[in-house]
Amino acid sequence: MRKLTKEQKRDIRAIAARKDQDIDFSDAPPILDWSGAEIGKFYRPTKKPVTMRLDSDVISWLKADGRGYQTKANWLLRHAMLHYTREKSRSDPDIAQRGGKARHQKRKA
C-alpha cells in the first residue's frame, strides 16, 4: 500500500474535523437491505512467516505458474483445512456442537 501524500493527509484531517451532521451523505443513501452483502469479503487474516520442508517436485509445481506460489500454497492449505473441518464436524457431533471448529484435544480413557 502506498503512503499518503501531504494533500491526502490534509484532506483526511479536514474531513475528520467535521461533525457527522455537517457531512452531506445525499449521494450515498443508507443501505437498508443487506441481503446481498458478502461476509468476510475484505477480511485479511494475519500472515506469519514459517519455514517448511517440501518435496522439490511440489515446489516446482507451485512455482510453475510464476509469481504467487506462496499465495497458491496458502489457498490450497486453506481449502484442505476447510474441507477437513467440514468432514470432521459431520462425523463428530462434539465438533458440530462447537460450531464446526475442530480442536485437537486428548480424550481421557
Image (cartoon, rainbow, N blue to C red):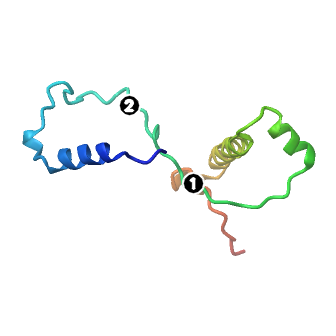
Side of 13 where 5 appears, left or right:
right
Q: Nearer the viewer, residue 64 or 102?
A: 64
Q: Nearer the viewer, mark 2 or mark 1?
A: 2
Q: Total number of numbered labels?
A: 2
Q: State whether residue 50 is above or below residue 58.
A: below
- Which residue is depicted at the point 23% across and 29% down? 32
Element marked by disc 1: loop
Q: Position of residue 46 (x, y in %)?
A: 55, 55
Element marked by disc 2: loop
Mark 1 crowd level (few <14, some 14–19, many ≥20, 10 Å Cα) = some
Q: Position of residue 38 (x, y in %)?
A: 43, 33
Q: State whether residue 92 is above or below residue 26.
A: below
Residue contact at pointers 2 and 1, CB within 8 angstroms: no
- Which residue is depicted at the point 43% across and 38% down? 39
User: Disc 2 designates what residue?
Assistant: 37
- Which residue type does callout 1 highlight? Lys
- Which residue is depicted at the point 72% across and 74% down? 109
In which quarter of the view is residue 59 placed? top right
Q: Position of residue 42 (x, y in %)?
A: 45, 40
User: Disc 1 designates what residue?
Assistant: 101
Q: Nearer the viewer, residue 109 or 18?
A: 18
Q: Nearer the viewer, residue 94 or 43?
A: 43
In which quarter of the view is residue 28 placed? top left
Q: Position of residue 62 (x, y in %)?
A: 80, 39
Side of 100 where 71 appears, left or right:
right
